[in-house]
Amino acid sequence: MAKSDREPGGRRTLRVLVGILVVALLAGGGVAWRTGWAEEWWHDLRADAAGPPADPAAVAPPPEVDVAPVAVPGVLAPAADGTAALKRAELRKALAPLGDRDLGKHVIAAVGPLDGTGLSYRIAEGPAVAIPASTTKIVTSAAALFLLGPDRVFSTTTVLDRSAGTTPRLVLVGGGDPFLARAPEPPTAAATYQPVRADVRTLAQRTARALKADGVRQVALGYDDSLFSGPALHPTWRPDYVPEEINPVSALWVDEGRPLPGQGPVADPSAEAARVFRDALAARGITVTGATTRTRAPAAATPVGAVTSPTVAQIVQRLIEVSDNAAAEILLRQAGVADQGEGSFAAGQRAVTRVLSANGIAMRGSVLHDGSGLSRDNRLSPVVLVDVLRLAASADHPQLRALLAALPVAGYTGSLANRMDLGPDAGRGRVRAKTGTLTGVTSLAGIAVDRDGHLMAFALMADRVKKPKSMLARVAMDNAAAALGACAC
């Protein structure tokens, strides 16, 4: 794994700027977030490969966020330092809540400087790996950003096959867009970040316009979802996860395979997407004859229409912020296509393993089966999570910085909007983390800046929590993470 162990030219100056931004955000109560200035600063910093890893306050969420004021406890934080040695004794005191009995008998953790090597603190009693739940999405997102790049988009297209008979055949081709919608959607006011989604109604409109311009008003219809292969549901997932947590994964679906209100589960998301497209096409004056069939688009077919997904960076922002299982599984398969030439669970995981290995990250006994963390057969070392976060902060990999920007801010955004409110006040706003929750499992992994400006990466995991203690265990975990931001470590 590439690391920067010394300060390159200009780093001290930029680190001072980071510190100034920390002060501005803490004292200004999020004014920079609302105006978008901090987001522009972060965008510029991402483009500078020699720049420092940004601290939680500096990695600004999108300008749509309405951030409440942060109480400033005493002295404001100085410039963040991601390389400084952390104090083991102070870390031990900060992480004392991990000793809470409500967390169960298997609690493991790792903490270290964000821009450095080695660990400053580690708990590894019992097995050194745990069920990671949704912290798995950190690894999936990093691999996808590494292989695909932050600006990659996925296209849903239509092509016309004139060799199919007297009536040309139009084929709807799925490109693996996780957020493809039935129809245009206005932004959700309650969402911290909502990317603009492509939709099949717009695709039908564009396709109908192009067909009419070409003199075509009647077509047969097929759909091609062959980009992905293998089982649509992972065999290790519990049956009751469908459709509450996930739907059959497909390269062609609308609304992540969810049914309309009042309808039952969608057994075949690809066929449902084709049905919605067919209705929209007919509404725009194109006659569709015969049954809609699953097929493969001929390589020689003529392109007709297309819509494109949000960028991979935008997809990561959304899936990390709200812990979107479906989007994570799509990105895993896209990683498999890019690296292995196959869009399956197995190929995706081979791609993830190869990315980690290529960057010097040892698996340490970790085994991952899916991209979302729904599998209870997943096992992950907290050290792997720390190393992946360090990789995302590395100056050598600015294309991964979107992962840090996606992490929810403790007490303010995404899955952490209503969490860490019982821990130290000084920790609020100083921690960004991804949650992980399954029955009996609670975990947090992310980055923090303490009161002395020390940047750290951390992963805290417990996977033997008794069900009646779930909420108490989550509070104990939250308190430990918040204490990292509040300590002088």
Image: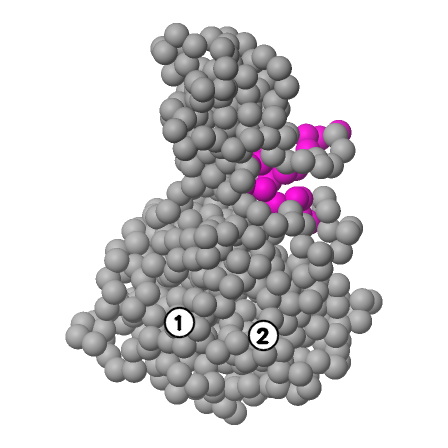
379 vs 102, left or right, is left
Give the residue pinned by disc 2.
366
Query: How packed is label 2: few (under 14 Cα within 10 Å), some, or many (20 or more)?
Result: some
Residue 488 vertical position relative to residue 220 in the rendered view, above or below = below
Q: Position of residue 61 (x, y in %)?
A: 42, 53
Q: Is residue 451 visible?
A: no
Q: Quadrant of the N terminus?
A: bottom left
Q: Quadrant of residue 265?
A: top right
Residue 431 vertical position relative to residue 324 in the rendered view, above or below = below
184 and 254: which is toward the camera: 254
Residue 360 vertical position relative to residue 273 in the rendered view, above or below = below
Extreme-left residue of the structure: 9
Earlier along the polypeptide chain: callout 1 or callout 2?
1
Q: Amino acid at mark 2?
A: Ser
Q: Position of residue 118 (x, y in %)?
A: 43, 86
Q: Main secondary structure of the magenta part?
A: loop
Extreme-bottom residue of the structure: 89
Q: Residue at x 55, y 86 (%)?
A: 122
Q: Which residues are magenta?
A: 245-262
Give the residue pinned by disc 1.
358
Q: Quadrant of residue 379?
A: bottom right
Q: Is residue 270 visible?
A: yes
**Element on which disc 1 rests:** helix
Q: Residue at x 61, y 45 (%)?
A: 249
Q: Is residue 64 magenta?
A: no
